[in-house]
Amino acid sequence: MLIEKEWREVKQTLETTLDRVFGIAADATSEFDSVLTHDQINALGYVRNFPHLTCVMCSIEPEELQNFSKHGAPLNSLFRGLVADYALLPATCYKVYLGLIGQDFTAERIESCIARCFRHEDKALDEYRAVNFTMKEYVYLGTPEGAQGHLTNGYAKLASIFDQLQIPIGCEVATDPFFDASSSVAKLSALMPTKREMVFNTHAVSSMNYHRNYFGEKFDIKCNAVSVHTSCVAFGIERWIAMFKEHFGTSGEALAALRRVA
């Protein structure tokens, strides 16, 4: 997804504005790479729940190499001589959990993070939806009450930002696009919704997600010897830029509005 040069300053200002509003220090954000090993993507349970959205990094099988180097074979969607070397990161917060495996800390924490993410979208691509995109997240790890409070505070901060920007926004209960709606995780999500989205003109630009103790138990992450509950407030950076283009029209207007956010 293209961010034209005149919109790069808007992107950078957006990121610093979000950090300021959410109380994140300038040097407190981790930027992750986009690669996961097979063991990591399988441990996350992503391929099991979202095989249709999973993206992989492939290399050409050795026996196929000369077809390209000597015979000029084209690479196209019919070619099958590929090795799935790695999986590509579908959500930034996964790197946080993988980096804390087996840890037991003494106080709740919020991790600020950003990464390029990849999803094999089954919907039409447009200025809001792309195969790869930038996801910025504030991830809470601690108690059930703290996890819920993080989302409540996150919603209030987002509502204030949109109010100051004078952008009309809605908030909707959402469900993740599980491949198998009959799976136990999908059923639990439907019975006890844990995802809300901030929506501009039918497009989700931010989400608030509660994972209960799923990642705490799966990766043995504890706070005071108790498996952590986690939640995150997430932002699709390119979607915000698309929203600004639609609402403000020019990068100058968007930049001026962002700079007025208290």
Image: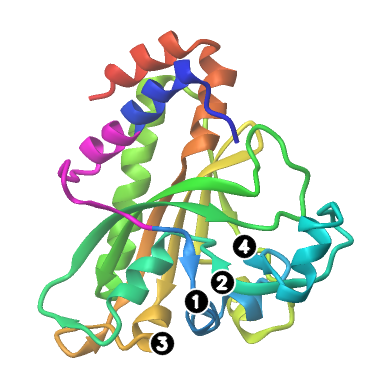
Label 2 sits on what residue type?
A: Tyr
Q: Which residues are magenta?
A: 15-32
Q: Quadrant of residue 174?
A: bottom right
Residue annotated with mark 2 = 86
Query: From the viewer's perspective, is the residue at label 1 or at label 4 nearer?
Result: 1
Mark 2: secondary structure:
strand
Task: Tell me the tag on residue 37.
Answer: 1
Task: Tell me the tag on residue 218.
Answer: 3
The quarter of the rendered structure image containing the N terminus is top right
Q: Quadrant of residue 141?
A: bottom left
The quarter of the rendered structure image containing the C terminus is top left
Query: From the viewer's perspective, is the residue at label 3 or at label 2 nearer?
Result: 2
Do tag 3 and tag 2 residues touch (Cβ < 8 Å)?
no
Mark 3: secondary structure:
helix
| Residue closest to the far right | 78
| Percent coordinates x, y for residue 155 in the rendering | 37, 46
Do tag 4 and tag 2 residues touch (Cβ < 8 Å)?
no
Query: From the viewer's perspective, is the residue at label 3 or at label 4 nearer?
Result: 3
User: Residue sitting at 47 percent across and 38 percent down?
Assistant: 237
User: Residue sitting at 47 percent across and 59 percent down?
Assistant: 34
Mark 4: secondary structure:
loop
Compare marks 3 and 1 and give the one earlier in the sequence.
1
Compare marks 3 and 4 and give the one earlier in the sequence.
4
Residue annotated with mark 4 = 175
| Percent coordinates x, y for residue 112 in the rendering | 27, 54
